Image (spheres, rainbow, N blue to C red):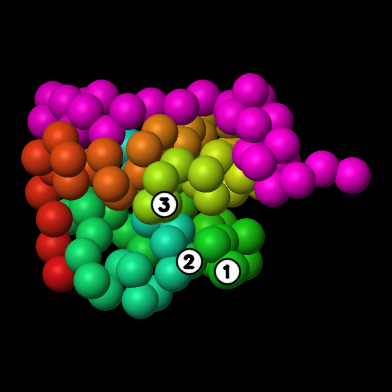
Amino acid sequence: MKTAQQLIADAKAQISEVTAREVQDQLARGESLVLIDIREQNEWAIGHAAPAQYIGRGVLESQIEAKVPRDARVVLMCASGNRSALSAITLREMGYNNVASMAGGFRDWVATGGAVAE
């Protein structure tokens, strides 16, 4: 039996993580990536990374295929990087081989000056 923190630690050991600053720099250079915010709808409504698409974690598996091709470079973000780490594992299992979790999530996006939309 594992705790939530153990599950998150295990997930982070198996996935790629990128920082908010790295994603901002990659987008500024015009690199191709799909930024997906998986937070709850009420979190998204308060504010979200301007270039992000919304797919809530609860429907990620059922909606991702219609919106994002499996060969796309995908960066998942949540509030702090924990839910996105768990979701990155799921997407990998679905055949998304170029997926990463944003360490620090939306909090770090804001703290590093990332563009925010409401």
Residue receiving disc 2: 56
Of the numbered discs 3 and 2, the one sitting upstream in the chain is 2
Q: What residue is drawn where x is 61% and y is 44%?
A: 86
* Element on which disc 1 rests: helix
Give the distance between the C-alpha atoms of the residues marked 3 and 2, in whole angstroms: 9 Å
Residue receiving disc 1: 59
Give x and y (percent) for residue 20: 27, 34
Which of the labelled discs sits on residue 78, or is there none?
A: 3
Give x and y (percent) for residue 3: 75, 46
**Mark 1 closeness class: few <14, some 14–19, many ≥20 residues within 10 Å:** few
Q: What residue is drawn where x is 37% and y is 64%?
A: 54
The answer to which image quadrant residue 27 occupies is top left
* Element on which disc 2 rests: loop
Horizontal side of 36 relative to 32 (left or right) equals: right
* Element on which disc 3 rests: loop
Q: Is residue 75 visible?
A: no
Total marks shown come to 3
Quadrant into which the N terminus falls: top right
Which region of the structure is painted magenta? 1-29
Give x and y (percent) for residue 36: 38, 52
- Looking at the rendered structure, the kind of residue marked 3 is Cys
In the image, farthest residue toward the right:
1
